[in-house]
Image (spheres, rainbow, N blue to C red):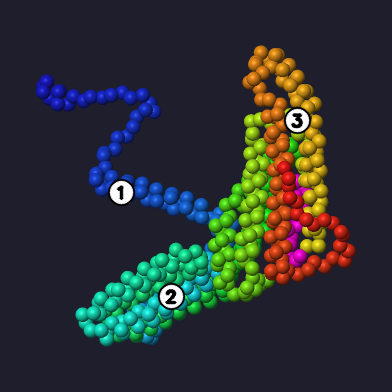
Amino acid sequence: MAKKASSRLEWRINVPDGASKVLEPESGAVGKIWVGLKGCMGIIVLKVWRVLENAWPIGVADPRKVIHCIKVGLALSIVSLFYYMRPLYDDFGGNAMWAVMTVVVVFEYTVGATFYKCINRVIATFLAGALGVGIHLVAEQSGDQLKPIILGISVFLFASAATFSRFIPSVKARFDYGAMIFILTFSLVSVSGYRVVELFELAHLRLSTIAIGTSLCILVTMLFCPVWAGCELHHLIHQNMEKLADSLDGCVTEYFKENGSEKDLNKKMKGYKCVLNSKAAEESMANFARWEPTHGRFNFRHPWKQYLKIGASLRNCAYCIETLNSCISSEIQAPPCLRKHFSNKCMKASSYSINVLKELVITIVKMKKSSNIDVKVAEMNFAVEELVDALKSLPTTHFIATTTGEESTKAKAEGVEGSEHPSPIMKVLPLVKVVSMMVEIATRIGGVVNAVEELARLAEFKAAKDGKPKQNQPTDKLVADH
């Protein structure tokens, strides 16, 4: 009876209400693998979604980039027909793949960059192929023993010479890609020609497919929403001028604490950094613009090099604005009374300097000579001369005496040694630096004016229609003596 009772004995645990859990059996190996796969898929989907979120603003900001992607896909789809269509494949065979490879490597964002690569590739392929076939014929006449020696020496000499040419600045700027293709093609023709019987036919087919690929790229990039490197460079230059004017306005306004939104001022003051970082983009666009045919308002021989000189002049101004911006965050600042004394004249010089830059922007955008630039430059020079005269007439002795008394009184009240306070001269120096930078900026803006006037002369800008008689104003650019 006891054994029977013990076999029916049960253990029970009382759990408070709401705290009970249903225990599930542990999943097996398949279940664990499935859970891990779901976690991996979730991570992948999340990363893809983040990439799409980052890519969407890029496409919205510049839809031309999306159009460029569509153009590349269109060109590849068309050139792939040489593989898909039997009649075309019978004519070209496996060499049709060279047309596909050509489209992949030469299709670029701008028309100029595409022209640069297409022309370099065709010319380099033709020269290297012709030279390789010629050397192969010479090696054939020399016998089987000398043939590999002649081919090896020719590859060494021409590859070394072409590689060295890439170090020459003029060649590197315009024909670097062509030199690389020359090395590749000549090596392929020389090496493959040693085992291939019909070398001339092989070279002919490859040159034909490359010509087809480059022609297709040129047609697609020019006919469907073309992006011209020359227009991009033109837009970049006048955009940098606008940013430079905004930065100058923001720095002077911030230093003298004029009314203005803090957010707008910070945005304006950072514009000069874009000007400082645009050198590589300007040089690249100018190089590609030389290859472009006549389009819009730009002729084939448009003076693209002059845009580089304008960009260099703008960067010279940007360096001064960067120095001016450093005065804002300086630990030692000029007294408010002294800053107020120079506020109006500095703001006036800044305003006239900005007017000159904005007039230059209008000149470049409209591609018309300005009838007001001489007057605006004269106003800028006169405002700067007033600023220099105000600096020379600064009552330094009275200021030093007044400031010394104020500093000593303040030091005594705080119980601090006077040596721990900056000297009055040190307090004047930041303001002198600001004034000198304003003068230097005006001088360098004069250099920008000269560069733009030279561009107007070389590009033959139209004369501005102005019925007013010209005023006899001095047009000499300011040369500061500080």
* Residue 359 on the magenta span: yes
Residue 106 vertical placement versus 332 (above, below): below
- 10 Å crowding of disc 2: few (<14), some (14-19), many (20+): many
Q: Measuring from the top left, give residue 203's x and y in whole percent.
A: 36, 81
Q: Name the residue located 70 percent from the left edge and 55 percent from the top edge.
A: 447
Q: Can you identify the residue that label 2 sits on?
A: 124
Q: Name the residue located 46 percent from the left edge and 77 percent from the top edge.
A: 123
Residue 151 vertical placement versus 39 (above, below): below
- 10 Å crowding of disc 1: few (<14), some (14-19), many (20+): few
Residue 376 vertical placement versus 293 (above, below): above
Q: Measuring from the top left, give residue 241's x and y in whole percent.
A: 68, 55
Q: In the rendered structure, are the residues bearing label 1 and label 2 in contact, judged by CB atoms less than 8 Å apart? A: no
In terms of secondary structure, where does tag 2 sit? helix
Q: Measuring from the top left, give residue 306's x and y in whole percent.
A: 64, 64
The amino acid at mark 3 is: Pro
User: Who comes first in sequence, dot 3 or dot 1?
Assistant: 1
User: Who comes first in sequence, dot 2 or dot 3?
Assistant: 2
Foreground of the two, 477 or 481: 481
Query: Which quarter of the figure has residue 344?
Result: top right
Give the main secondary structure of the magenta stretch.
Answer: helix
Q: Can you identify the residue that label 1 sits on?
A: 34
Q: Give the range drawn in magenta.
A: 350-369
* Residue 271 on the magenta span: no
- Distance between the alpha carbons at the discs numbered 1 and 2: 56 Å
Query: Which quarter of the figure has residue 410?
Result: top right
